[in-house]
């Protein structure tokens, strides 16, 4: 289709169905602009990729709302209804469990909420952790001391942190012990008071490790547990701590559960197509054990 700008009027020329979808996307963008937001190209890509699955006009209201869990200067917004529910759950619950495929913003949004809580002085420190599961390479064979061995497992957490807060400020907060990034094994025996704790890649915890983490929560603390239950790298026959906790904790007040799906993927649109392709391929596979990372 063609989109023609005629000053105060935009004319969309093309097939009726496609033109209607384009109009819906543009209307959503306009709603966000009228509410004081400046939509980015990523916002537009997200609207285009999701317009056939839901009313993209809702995207305007999503972009114009600042979730209560996020500071205004952090500049992170929900782009899907699932993401908005996720941030609202983090704000209203002491502990949140979230599962979903790659690209749905599980870790990134949790990090934004944690940074916001720290800068708002709602907590005294942020603790970021994930299990160092040996998928392909063994820790003992990696070069360097212990810190250098575990750093590759923690790199995604650093990347998300640096994307929200400038590097110098992150270093100052780390020097002041306001931000800690460590493997899950380092959490044993600790009680974390006045902290915002994020457990990433929780599908790779065992049941015992998950219980150990959940019982670290101290007074005035908040925790978010993220993971993708289709990407388990545990040894065959080992029960995932995330899947177990999802079922065991479902009726406990104060613990929220959020399930994100394909409609919440906001990474490169190609990621959504990859997820769809693997789901179709998995449905044809003669053996499905829920361990996508180990199927040939």
Image (spheres, rainbow, N blue to C red):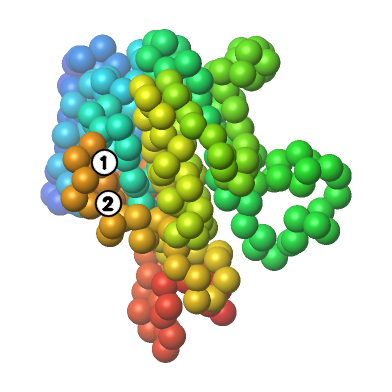
Q: CA distance from mark 1 to mark 2?
A: 7 Å
In the image, which disc is placed on residue 249?
2
208 or 150: nearer the viewer: 208
Kindly indicate whether the residue at mark 2 contacts the one at mark 1 (C-beta within 8 angstroms). yes
In the displayed structure, 21 sits above or below 242; it is above
Q: Hey, which quadrant is residue 25 in on the image?
A: top left
Quick one: label 1, few (<14), some, or many (20+) residues within 10 Å?
some
Lower position in the chain sequence, tag 1 or tag 2 = 2
Residue drawn where x is 61% and y is 46% of the image: 185
86 or 218: nearer the viewer: 218
Residue 10, x across and y down, in percent: 21, 26
Q: Hey, which quadrant is residue 110 in on the image?
A: top left
Residue drawn where x is 57% and y is 43% of the image: 188
Residue 42 can be seen, yes or no: no
Q: Quadrant of the C terminus?
A: bottom right
Total residue callouts: 2
SS for callout 1? strand
Residue drawn where x is 37% and y is 30% of the image: 222
State left or right for residue 207 relative to residue 22: right
Q: Quadrant of the N terminus?
A: top left
Residue 23, x across and y down, in percent: 18, 36
In the image, which disc is placed on residue 255?
1
């Amino acid at each position: 289709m063609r989109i023609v700008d005629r000053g105060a009027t935009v004319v969309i020329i093309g097939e009726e169905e496609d033109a209607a979808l384009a109009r819906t996307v543009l209307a959503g963008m306009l709603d966000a602009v009228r509410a004081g937001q400046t939509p980015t190209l990523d916002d537009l890509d997200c609207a285009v990729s999701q317009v056939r699955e839901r009313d993209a006009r809702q995207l305007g209201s999503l972009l114009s709302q600042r979730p209560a869990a996020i500071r205004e200067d952090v500049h992170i917004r929900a782009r899907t209804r699932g993401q908005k529910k996720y941030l609202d759950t983090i704000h209203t619950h002491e502990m949140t469990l979230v599962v979903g495929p790659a690209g749905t913003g599980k870790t990134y949004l949790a990090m934004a909420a944690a940074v916001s809580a720290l800068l708002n002085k709602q907590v005294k420190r942020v603790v970021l952790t994930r299990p160092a599961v040996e998928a392909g390479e063994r820790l003992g064979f990696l070069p360097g001391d212990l810190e250098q061995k575990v750093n590759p497992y923690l790199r995604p957490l650093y990347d998300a942190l640096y994307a929200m807060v400038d590097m110098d400020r992150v270093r100052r907060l780390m020097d002041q012990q306001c931000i800690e990034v460590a493997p899950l094994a380092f959490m044993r025996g600790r009680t974390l008071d006045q902290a915002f704790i994020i457990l990433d890649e929780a599908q790779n915890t065992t049941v015992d490790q998950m219980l150990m983490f959940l019982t670290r929560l101290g007074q005035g603390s908040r925790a978010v547990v993220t993971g993708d239950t289709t990407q388990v790298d545990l040894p065959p026959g080992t029960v995932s701590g995330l899947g177990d906790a999802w079922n065991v904790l479902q009726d406990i007040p104060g613990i929220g559960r959020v399930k994100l799906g394909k409609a919440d993927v906001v990474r490169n649109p190609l990621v959504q197509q990859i997820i769809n392709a693997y789901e179709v391929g998995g449905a044809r596979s003669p053996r499905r054990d829920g361990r996508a990372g180990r199927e040939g």
